[in-house]
Structures are given as C-alpha cells and as structure tokens.
Image (spheres, rainbow, N blue to C red):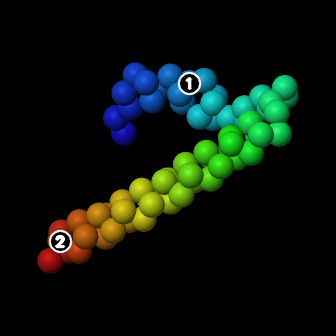
Amino acid sequence: MIVDEEEFAVLKSGEFGLPRNLEGMSVASLKDYRAALEREIKHVDETLEHRKGVTEGAEAFFKS
C-alpha cells in the first residue's frame, strides 16, 4: 500500500483524526458536521463498491 505524506499525517494523527472533540460546538455546527460525515460515508461506500467491481474484474481476467 502506497501512502502519500498527507495521508500519512492523517493516519498518524489517530484513527483518521477521529474521534473529534465535539465540546464547544454549537448544535448547528454539530448538525453540519454530522451531515459532512454522512456524505463522507456515502463516498467511502461508493469507492468500496467500485473497487470491489474492479477487483472482481481483475480476478475474472486472470482466471481465464
């Protein structure tokens, strides 16, 4: 697995910078943060699904 410096900094700072300290955040900010996390989860799910298809395609190609 190749990790660039920016990704390494994120990984090194904890589990992807999570959990985040939520103290002092307003209700509106918390709702915005939650919405952003939900969008990121959707993005990750879509990426995983794409990679699953790529992996399956590669496996099928090399089996034949």
As shown in the figure, which amino acid type bears the numbered disc 2?
A: Phe
Image coordinates of residue 37 in percent, x first then y, are 63, 47
Please, what secondary structure does the residue beneath circle 2 have?
helix
Q: Which residue is mark 2?
A: 61
Q: Residue at the spot x=29%, y=64% of the render?
A: 54
- Seen in the image, is 20 located left or right of residue 54? right
**In front of the other: 49 or 24:** 24
From the top left corner, tell me how far across and down residue 8 is, in percent: 46, 26
**Percent coordinates x, y for residue 32 in the rendering:** 68, 42
Give the residue pinned by disc 1. Answer: 12
Residue at the bottom extreme of this rendering? 64
Snapshot quadrant of residue 12: top right
Q: Would you place residue 26 above or below residue 63 in this image?
A: above
Q: Residue at x 36, y 62 (%)?
A: 50
Q: Position of residue 28 (x, y in %)?
A: 77, 40
Q: Earlier in the sequence, mark 2 or mark 1?
A: 1
Q: Quadrant of the N terminus?
A: top left
Q: Determine which quarter of the picture holds residue 31.
A: top right
Q: Residues within 10 Å of mark 1 (few under 14, many from 20)?
A: few
Residue 15, compared with residue 49, is above or below; it is: above
Q: Is 57 situated above or below 1?
A: below
Label 2 – label 1 distance at C-alpha = 36 Å
For the residue labelled by badge 1, is the local secondary structure a helix, a strand or a loop? helix
The amino acid beneath tag 1 is Lys
In front here: 62 or 5?
A: 5
Count of labels in the image: 2
Quarter of the image for the C terminus: give it: bottom left
